[in-house]
Image (tube, helix red, strand yellow):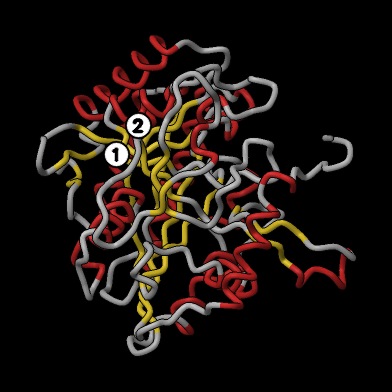
Amino acid sequence: MKRLDPKNLRFWLPTYMINKIKRLLRPVEVIYPIHIIFCFVDHFEPFWREADEIAAVKRVKMWEKVYPQLARRHRDWTGVPLQHTFFYPIEEYDQEILEKLASLCKLGVGEVEIHYHHNHDTSDNLRNSLNRFKEILWDTHNLLSRHVNSDEVMYGFIHGNWALDNSRSDGKWCGVNNEITILRETGCYADFTLPSAPSDTQTRKINSIYYATDDPLLPKSHDWGSDVRVGACEKGDLMIIQGPLCLDMGMWKKIRKPRIENGEISWDNPPSPRRWNLWLSQWIHVIGKPNWIFIKVHTHGAQDRNFEVVLGEPMDLFLEYVEKEFNDGEKYCLHYVTAREMYNIIKAAEQGCGPDPTKYRDFLLKKRE
């Protein structure tokens, strides 16, 4: 099957085509202005390719030097600067690097959450690793957030190698079939791993915000789930916040075949107006609130080859375009958010709040001051 379908389209293309037909038959009815909630999440791995500490610290220093200037040059509808969420790997913990990231975040341009690469793991070790790292981030570095109702320390999560809930077909890079349950029990408020195409970890459900219900005996319990809806209660174990996934037919003239658009920003896949329009057209929203659109894109921002794009002119020009064309206050209002803030706004939409999403950045989860 892999030889016949090297891009693993079988996992998600049927859903994509069905959704396109549904949209044609029943177009989304929109009330203006459309609020675009934009979140940039980062699989931030400073020790990428087994770098030593000197090289890892150098990568973080590049972010310290360049990113605050970039962020402050770009403002959303309410004047908030560009936000960046650093999902930091448990297995790469380094006190100096986390201190630098914490200082960077105190400038008001980002936050830190949890990332984890593991292989042939056990439930007990996973639980212990998450709890221990959560405590380190909270107690030592004044990071993460608390739930306003329970005071529980909470975190967002991205799975290394895309293999959330043991979802690789070969069983590598996880090993824990009840991972979704463990994430919920250790204080994870939402998972931000997806989309993962062309990996075989990609779910059937795409371009959605939904609750996954764990089957602790089987892998890939998040393959499908219940959409988050206005006025509905939570229905499942963990919220899954997906980024855009679609086919980019605009590349047909160049490569004679459609290209997978998965929201990744990298040295060989820079942001562009065409890509932005594709992300926007997937119309990821809470059911019943179609004029709040959630766009989550991702990068590996500590990889040297991505610096020029993520921190340089390509990103600058892209953001200038977005702020000029999609931030007029009448048809569109742009909102730069962290992963935590995106979750809070989703929960506010679920509870029927409105009309301005930016009021709900701290709706349920408040970051450590």
Question: Residue at the spot x=82%, y=41% of the render?
Answer: 6
| Mark 2 lies on residue | 98
Q: Is residue 140 left or right of residue 168?
A: left
Q: Nearer the viewer, residue 27 or 92?
A: 27
Determine which quarter of the picture holds residue 123: top left
Q: Position of residue 132 (x, y in %)?
A: 30, 17
Question: Residue at the spot x=53%, y=19% of the render?
Answer: 118
Q: Tag 1's secondary structure?
A: helix
Q: Position of residue 242 (x, y in %)?
A: 49, 51
Disc 1, disc 2: CB below 8 Å?
Answer: yes
Q: Which residue reaches farthest bottom?
A: 330
> Can I make out residue 334 in this image?
no
Q: Nearer the viewer, residue 308 or 21?
A: 21
Q: Is residue 34 left or right of residue 58?
A: left
Q: Tag 2's secondary structure?
A: helix
- The amino acid marked with disc number 1 is Ala
> Can I make out residue 33 in this image?
yes
Tag 1: Cα neighbours inside 10 Å, few (<14), some, or many (≥20)? some
- The amino acid marked with disc number 2 is Leu
Residue 78 drawn above or below residue 109: below
Determine which quarter of the picture holds residue 66: bottom left
Q: Nearer the viewer, residue 70 or 262?
A: 262
Q: Position of residue 50 (x, y in %)?
A: 61, 22
Q: CA distance from mark 1 to mark 2?
A: 6 Å
Tag 2: Cα neighbours inside 10 Å, few (<14), some, or many (≥20)? some
| Mark 1 lies on residue | 102
Q: Position of residue 326 (x, y in %)?
A: 45, 81
Q: Is residue 245 left or right of residue 82?
A: right
Question: Residue at the spot x=38%, y=64% of the render?
Answer: 287
Quadrant including the C terminus: top left
**Which mark is on residue 248?**
none
Residue 270 drawn above or below residue 2: below
